[in-house]
Image (tube, coloured by chain):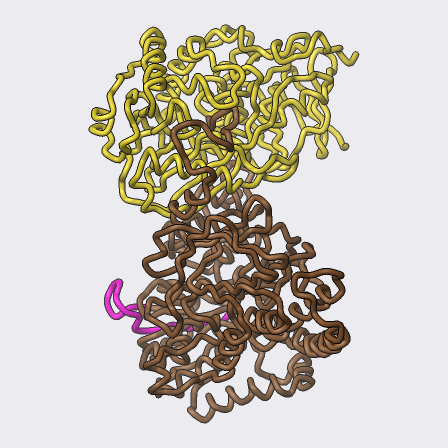
Amino acid sequence: VTEATNPPSHPTLESPASPTDHTSPSTYDVVVVGAGPAGLTAALHLASAGLSVALLDEQTGLGGQYYRRPSPAVLARAGDHRPAGSRLVAAVRAAGVDCRTGTSVWGVGDDQRTLLTCASTGPAAAGGGGQVTGRYLVIATGAYERVLPFPGWELPGVTTVGFAQHLAAADGVPVGRRVLLAGSGPFLLPVACSLLRLGVTVVGVAEAGRPYRLSGAGLSALRFPARLAELAGYAAQLARHRVPLWQDRVVARADPDAPGQHVQSVTLAATQAPAQPLAQFEVDALCVGMGFRPQAELPQLLGCAMVTDPASGDLRPAIARDGQSSRPDVYIAGEAAGIGGARQAAAEGARVAQSILTREAALPTTPHPPTSHHQPAAARQASRTNRRHRRQDQFAALTSRLYPPPIELATRLTQALPGDVRVCRCEAVTAAQIRAAASPTVPSGIDAGTVRALTRAGMGPCQGRECAPAVGALCGTGPVAPAQPRMPVRPVPLTAIAALATPAPDPMPTSPMPVNTVPS
Amino acid sequence: VTGSLGPADVVVAGAGILGAAAAYHLARRGLRVVIAERAAPNREGSGTTAGNVHVQAIHTRRPGQAVPVDSERFLPLQQAASQRWARVEDELGTSVEYQQAGGLMVAETEEQAAELKAKGEWEAAAGIPTELLDGRAAREVLPALGPTVVAATWCPADGYANPLLVTQAYLAAAQRLGAVLRPFTPVIGLARRGSGWRTLTPAGHLDSAAVINVAGPWLHRIAALAGISLRLTPVAIQMHATVRGPTLLRHLLVQHIGRGLSVKQVSAGNVLIGGGWPAAGLAEDQRPQASVASMAGNVAEAIRILPPLAGLRLLRAWAGPLAATPDEMPVIGPVPGAPGLFVASGTYAFTFAPLWGETLAALVAGEQPPVEIRDLGPARLMEGDQFAPLA
């Protein structure tokens, strides 16, 4: 599966990352991590009110996944697929936000508030690191795509739906000519429509659940006419193009045209019996996605209280209504705190900004005292964003009622997985190896951490981000989130770490001193 | 607390590498062994260590160290431990990735080079082969060494075993021989009962003639349950692993005579960087966190000694606990005044684990241990004669 979460290698509108060689932390009123809808909106409101704001993102351009900016060539040819994104990015720049793109946040300093950074791409990626801190931190890191393994999931031509959407919407490039989409969740429908607009033959859309009928849950969607109309609109487009929308179907396997070559066919099965093939389809691309998972490593590293979502098993930060985490100076906005889509993310970004501005207005002395008339205005705005947000929350809750719980899907699909399928691709660990380590016949006290240690599943460069749901389901333990947050969040050049050593290393002992003992 | 958890000749507190090795050797003698582990096996120091099997002498003078390791006393034990490791894979019937690729101890100053020379004499006396090299010769052995290295000792016996596999292999072998592992079963009480001991857990109690307390950084807490005070200090140190890289170090263990640094590349290609740098703290029921200051300091030293590491990325940093003795020496033996109660912990527990496992089993059986350990007993950690039997 080719994922969409890696920074693109092609040039973009943004200037290349400025070298992040600051040895002492740059300090701002607010540091926002993640320049998607949530982070952009928060940064815009905060900077417009006069606060100094840094906006960090590991992509080379602002916009995140949803508002990813097309390349100049695509803009010239196809225009802007999301003009609202261009307007938001322009407003953020005009508001004086210090935009640090191409910057990965890989850790948190020993003071528990300094963010440690390195260049995520380009020539500087092999170089030094940086440090940035703020009186407030806003974490808006978004989500990962949730993927579950199946026979053939590693074949060329098998991608996530998110990757196909980027290619289609931002770059105007179809992922294939005959494409099948499979997985679960509302995101499959708009991606299928994006492909249709490019002239792709969409072979069909396979949804693991049965969301598209007027059940009790479906009827209550009528209370959210805008979102329902949007989904219905996508479904109507698919129907016009005679694209089948199969429900209760999952990918049983994908097969190549020759061993190890490009995907050529997809076999579907019923969700209840994933190993029993029902129908086979010729394709040249297969796009899969089981929804999204919060990207919540930074809140965990910052010591924010975390909760486990019972339906998905995902770890996410516990937040108050205004997005505040258990740490008063750390706010979470957008999908890092729970999956709700781009609209909800932007609303949360606004709400977090309002909460911070309300607090700032209440402070007797601040570096940028807002004028007194801001206070009632801020309260009014907060009330509006709260109302809007409640509606969004309800829609997110409805979505989770319509589609099958991810943890159930993961359990069902991994149980049916043939033993030779690689589940952890970084360390090449198969389903059989994980089952053997997790088997109660293995004479040991087993938990997910033990399985991880015995098999190395989840110990490679992706650090388990991709395989954690599948490994956890195979172990029968729920997702394998490390009990403790671990640095680095992303693999970081040793040179960027060594640059933080103070004072500069010399051959004589310096502080901090190693302790009296050495590892055995 | 409910009833008895079943019959046991020996209760082992802690399923780290020492507990696992002791359980294996006890079970091999036909004794009924129950291992009580508060969480999952191999989760703390034994699973977080770098896996070094240290044979050549270690740092004798480290920053902040009040008492130097007594290398003359230590080296014969290291030699015995190394010889014991050579049989482990055959005994357990599985690979634990044990290898003797050798190791270099480097020096960057003339003073450090002189220390290398001095330790070479002790090593020769202990029968450990080491060779003193100048900087150029050291770089011929390992071209990755940087220009600041002025001398090094080469010891072909330095080794490595995979710490994620060894404890599990010992536990599996012990269980095949009838030992019972009770994970997620903390010891919450320990008292004399008749001529033996009663161990309390939330699931029930265990009565046994002998108890082996190998709870690592929590050893002194379990001893305290029986009214025994031991001067052991829990310490958290941290480790670092890079992404897989091309072969740079030929799997040698690279250490520094004067600085906290140990580096090696494991079979998978990851480079492990450690050296006893302190982690951010040690809480009773939580993993200590890696400290950025220690990470930066340790990584900077590693790059200075091994410049090609600069091209790699750090994949993981983690912290693990260990138990430090005031004199930097291991502790192993019967607790004076508490017949049937044994402890093992302290310096280089991973290196010594196979030897200490066999030693503990011999002590329980009342036999002569394979090495002389009378001077390593816990008496020196006890504050006065404070143990009073609990009737």
Chain B colour in the picture: yellow
* Residue farthest bottom in this picture: A240
Q: Is residue B27 left or right of residue A462?
A: right
Which chain is in brown here?
A
Q: Residue B384's image quarter? A: top right
What is the span of residues highlighted in magenta in the rendered image?
A255-271
Tally of numbered tags: 0
Going by the image, does A113 lie left or right of A15? right
Q: Is residue B108 above or below residue B68?
A: below
Query: Where in the figure is residue A93, as x and y percent of width and height?
Result: 50, 74
Residue A150 or A286: which is nearer the viewer? Answer: A286
Q: As displayed, is residue A389 above or below residue B222?
A: below
Whether residue A265 appears in magenta in the rendering, the answer is yes
Q: Could you tell me which residue is drawn at 65 percent across and 68 percent down?
A: A352
Residue A1 visible at all? no
Which quadrant holds the N terminus of chain A? bottom left
Residue B112 visible in this rendered orientation of the protein: yes
Query: Which quarter of the figure has residue A264?
Result: bottom left
Where residue B139 appears, as percent x and y from the top left, is 23, 29
Quarter of the rendering containing residue A317: bottom right
Q: Residue B286: horizontal and vertical position, in percent? A: 62, 39
